[in-house]
Amino acid sequence: MELLIKNARVIDVSQDFIGDIYIKDGLINQIGKDILKENVEVFDCKGKVLMPSFIDTHAHFRDPGLTWKEDLETGSRAALRGGYTGVCLMANTNPICSSKEVLEYIRNKSIELNLIDIHQCLSVTKNFDGKTLSHLEEFKNDKEVKAFSDDGVGVSNSNTMMEAMKIAKKNNWVLMSHAESPEFSKIDMRIAENMMTLRDLELSKITKAHLHMCHVSTKEALEYIINAKNTGVNVTLEVTPHHIALTSEVSNYRVNPPIREKEDVEAILKAIKLGFVDTIGTDHAPHTLEEKSKGSPGMVGIETAFSVCYSKLVKDRIISLNELSKLMSYNPAKLLGMNKGKISIGIDGDFVLVDIDKKIKVNSEEFASKGSNTPFDGMEYYGEVLATIKGGEIKYKK
Ligand code: DOR
Ligand code: ZN
């Protein structure tokens, strides 16, 4: 695929300039000013911001088995509409992603769809049984596996978690932790997150495995993780747009971990400002409205993530747009081993074009996702995704 992008304000983790980008064979081939090519599609981006496409470290596309909520096609189209060309999908499908069959089904379908790049997580324990790790043996030579997770429930047995971390270390995989102690989830969701965070950090310290703490939401968990980082523990930290933007004062929307208090949100913002947060993961979790009314936790978020994060982090002067690009593109790509996330020669020609001055009102009826379960409906933010390009092909255009 060839494409010539002209006159964009180009922003990534470390650059901010006005210029052109030429994409050839799917990769960034030339970066500069006044690039001229014959017989090549030209995309004029004057007055708009072009960034590396976003990569989501945490999403649920519900395929196979729960496809009335979402499927790989609608999830991928929602991702594109949100500016994403790469996602890391959680394993809580039906069946759970514990076998070659399920993994191959997802990989093949996503290749067939040819919309975005999908990294599918394996489950840590077989079918989320909380104890069996033997299925992982089958995947030790699978170069495409980067991360595994029991997200949705978490691994409650500490010894099982330690053995899983040893496997992570040996295979060079990332263990993504949904930190929620089932002993406490019915009693106190704050203790539930804090206890498991402490345990996981201790086990990562012992095993030296790369631990990725998903959707961190309490000020205590943040403090534990930051302390661990400062003493060299191999841990990365993910936060969600909803834990950045909402407090329990304004929303009691059901999600795990829950929407927290003002002090927790302030602690998240401070951690972002000080550079302790590694990635933004949306935890895009589609459910039908009927399921929501019966208490299913979670919300869709992949189509609103940029506007919410741009408004709450950049517009509100917590960080620069370069730093947001680091959280939404550069670091996620590094974590998942994708050839994306920055603008330089040889990197995938994946971009998002945004209008940072445009005020938008969230309208869930416009979502490409099957899910419309969002607490952001009707809320106003700055920043609109105008187009998403993958490998030099414009895959989404408003
Ligand atoms: O709220 C949530 N929903 N938290 C999770 O960890 C899982 C997710 C889901 O899969 O619905
Ligand atoms: Zn989770």
Image (cartoon, rainbow, N blue to C red):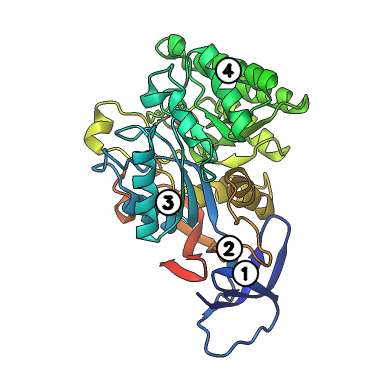
Disc 2 designates what residue?
Answer: 348
Looking at the rendered structure, which numbered label has been put on residue 105?
none
Q: Residue lying farthest bottom?
A: 38
Label 4 Cα neighbours within 10 Å, binned few <14 / some 14-19 / many ≥20: many
Q: How many labels does the image show?
A: 4
Q: Residue at x 54, y 18 (%)?
A: 161
Q: Gap between marks 3 and 1, in whole Å?
A: 25 Å
Three-letter amino acid code at the position of disc 4? Met
Q: What residue type is labelled 2?
A: Asp
Mark 3, residue position: 303
Q: Is mark 1 on a helix, strand or loop?
A: strand
Task: Tell whether 62 sits left or right of 231.
Answer: left
Task: Give the residue pinned by disc 1.
Answer: 28
The residues bearing labels 2 and 1 have C-alpha atoms spaced at a distance of: 6 Å
Mark carried by residue 162: 4
Q: Earlier in the sequence, mark 2 or mark 1?
A: 1
Q: CA separation, marks 4 and 1?
A: 41 Å
Which of label 2 and label 4 is nearer to you?
A: 4
Image depth: mark 3 or mark 1 in front: 1
Q: Do the residues labelled 2 and 1 touch (CB within 8 Å)?
A: yes
Say which quarter of the image contains residue 228: top right
Identified at 32% across, 43% down, the residue is 63
**CA separation in Å, label 2 and label 4:** 36 Å
The disc, 4 or 1, on the residue closer to the chain's N-terminal end is 1
